[in-house]
Image (tube, helix red, strand yellow):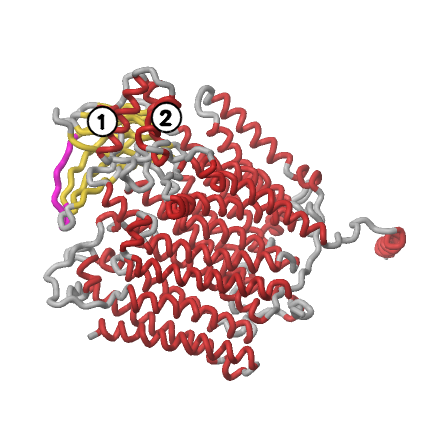
Amino acid sequence: MLVEAGHFALALALGLSLIQFLVPLWGARANDPVLMAVAPTSALAVFACIAFSFLALTFAYLNSDFSVLNVVQNSHSAKPLIYKISGVWGNHEGSMLLWVLILALFGAVVALSRNSVPMRLQANTLAVQAAVTIAFLLFILTTSNPFTRVVPAAVEGQDLNPLLQDPGLAIHPPLLYIGYVGFSISFAFACAALIDGRIDAVWARIVRPWTLGAWAFLTLGIAMGSYWAYYELGWGGWWFWDPVENASLMPWLAGTALMHSTVVMEKRDALKVWTILLAILTFSLSLLGTFLVRSGVLTSVHSFAVDPERGTFILGILILFIGGSLALFAWRAPMLKQGGLFAPVSREGALVVNNLFLATACATVFIGTLYPLALEVLTGEKISVGAPFFNFTFLPLIVPLLLLLPLGQTLAWKRGNFLGTAQRLYAVFGISLLATIVMFAFTYGGPVAAPLGVGLGLYLVLGSINEIVTRSWSKGTPLAVAWRKARGLPRSAWGTSIAHAGVGLTVIGIAATAWGVEAIGSLKPGERLKGGDYEVRLERVIPRVEANYREEAALLTVFGSGREVGTVETMKRLYLTRGMPTTEAGILTVGLGQVYASIGDAQPDGSVGVRLYHKPLVLLIWIGSLVMAIGGGISLTDRRLRIGAPVPAKTMPPHAVPAE
Amino acid sequence: MRVVLALIAALLFSASAFAVQPGEVLKDPALERRAREISAGLRCLVCQNQSIDDSDAQLAKDLRLLVRERLVAGDTDDQVENFLVQRYGEFVLLKPTFGSHTLLLWLTPALILILGGIGAYAALRRRPQPASASLDDEERTALENLLKRDQSA
């Protein structure tokens, strides 16, 4: 009964979204406040309906209601509670429901921020948002209904894919979707501005928190996915340039560019047209990511052609929204007035360079991901584009960007002085260079990329510290005064510096992987395997039986320079319901590095294959990402950006610039 | 999004996720290092975007052994790659060769960077530059007067 109610609520939400789309749009055109006021009310109602629908499905999972097909296919009564919950979005239908839930949630938040968003803008924005909601609700209701019943009801479920039964992957999709869908708000605001034909710094101030928030969540989501792949897939890689990963990296790169260009727009009223375009592109890439992953086109062009229903539907959504918004852009953008002048060497100029490199990097990932598909469809020729291609093309685009980052961060707005800025950074240059040389000397004969990369990361971290220090301290200032000044700096300044330092930490972590060592061997109990400074001894292999899997666990003692530093357990599991094996890596964290072991097949002579890695500083990859997201969060708490905070009249621009 | 990767992975790693087996490793560390480097650039043909170095599929294992065989026989890295391309087509290379069929793929990054750079510069040049940051004579005297007044106060 509750399941049917959930299904019905979804259909009701579709009807309400239609109202949320049509009425406010008309109201904004007719300048009728009553009609425009329908927008927030209907947005809240849509959210309530979808939330109810989502809860109904969750309830079916919690109760192991095996009369629902979706629950049968993705759950099991013996599954731990957390995976019963995460099972809701661990499948196609449920994850799409989560997608629209987050979409509606954000719509509701926009609806509630009445005081800070002008009424017309709010009405138009919520109307555009409703259009997206309509499309995805139709998609769910017609092709991916999670509430389908199965008669007769099954006795037991088929269990959730074992790889997904992991805390990291339980929260990975929600994080990622909050990021993806968060950009829909920036998109809706951009379309609303185009519909209205006016855009100003107030617009940028309203949109920036959304972009920042979406970006921070997307960063966390990607980092979480990467860490999951690292410990779960069992060979210690953390980024594979897999199309599915690229699908989330593209909106991240575009979103990073958007976040920076919104700053220029807010502070200097410049780059308006470009910012609008970026907002459209970023969400388009989120949609593209959804299409790539959900349509099955990646597995093979043919599997897409065989079962094209869902893929074609999302492709339609994709074409409608990307095409529609770009057409709107082409029609309306020329009417937007350009403001804010600046010299090429200035903070604005640096941010233009930032956008140029990020956009190119994004385009590179885009073409690398889609080119093989396009080539096969057009000529039938099959090529592969994998990690070697991306490393070869992506790095030359990112390294110059990172080299320029501390300089750009230090440059003055409007008109900067390149030499003067470089002088403010001389200590940073000096220390990083010295550190790089010292690392070279100590690791002579080792990989060249590692010291260079670690030096670059260090330069970024120091550059960020330098930014805070030079803004609050100069020679002769007592430390107490400097501290007070530093604390008085705007939160967004702190957020920027912290996020940029996070980039540096990630770069250090990535570069240091080149120093990693790997050893492969087959061990009998009592035998040892040496990899670099670390050594493991296989103690014993223990068979175990758990509720929904069976495993063989290898207990290894880890020695570092001869002394025992700990033990790790690495498992080979067999999930019984699906008959599917997985590997659980044994990981010992030593400082910021990790000793990583996984076991393979048993050999005929009774030994087991053991793979051992030592990965120095590897944790910095994800710590850095976390710091980036925290930086975004701190920026979000800046007074100016707090959603709903009253805006003092004197900080408002004198008047909004009309289009004509 | 990972969900699907996981599903794919689940289908592929019917054995454990443990690519290079202990028995495959060559005695000569230099040769083994070369073998690993070549393997990382070769696609496991039956897998989803995986190199033969990362994959557990039987085919990947066969290819790894083949690469090592050729290396032991004295082939250069290029010869090994060419041998595999002749046998399996260009599909086996994770980094496609530069040619008429991949022109757009290889040139897009450079094109976008250059065209974008020119576009941005042109857009910037079209607009009037901000007035000079230095003061003209009139402003300078006005400022000096202000400062004097400030000091005398």
Q: Chain of mark 1?
A: A
* In the image: residue A581, left or right of residue A292: left
Q: Which residue is mark 1?
A: A537
Dot 1 and dot 2 residues touching (CB under 8 Å): no
Q: Is residue A567 visible?
A: no
- As helix, strand or loop, the secondary structure at mark 2 comes to helix
Q: Quadrant of the C terminus of chain B?
A: bottom right
Q: Which residue is mark 2?
A: B82
The main secondary structure of the magenta stretch is strand
Does the magenta-highlighted stretch encompass residue A609? no
Q: Give the extent of the magenta segment.
A: A540-549
Front of the two marks 1 and 2: 2
* Rendering coords of residue A559 (x, y %): 28, 27
> Vertically, is A431 above or below A240?
above
- As helix, strand or loop, the secondary structure at mark 1 comes to strand
* In the image: residue B150, left or right of residue A473: right
Task: Answer few, some or many: residues within 10 Å of disc 2's Cα (few below 14, many 20 plus, some between 14 and 19).
Answer: some
Between B30 and B105, the residue placed more toward the observer is B105
Q: Chain of mark 2?
A: B
Between A622 and A646, the residue placed more toward the observer is A622
Same chain? Circles 1 and 2: no
Instruction: Please name the amino acid that badge 1 sits on.
Output: Arg
Quarter of the rendering containing residue A202: bottom right
Instruction: Please name the amino acid that badge 2 sits on.
Output: Asn
Name the residue: 67% across, 43% down: A474
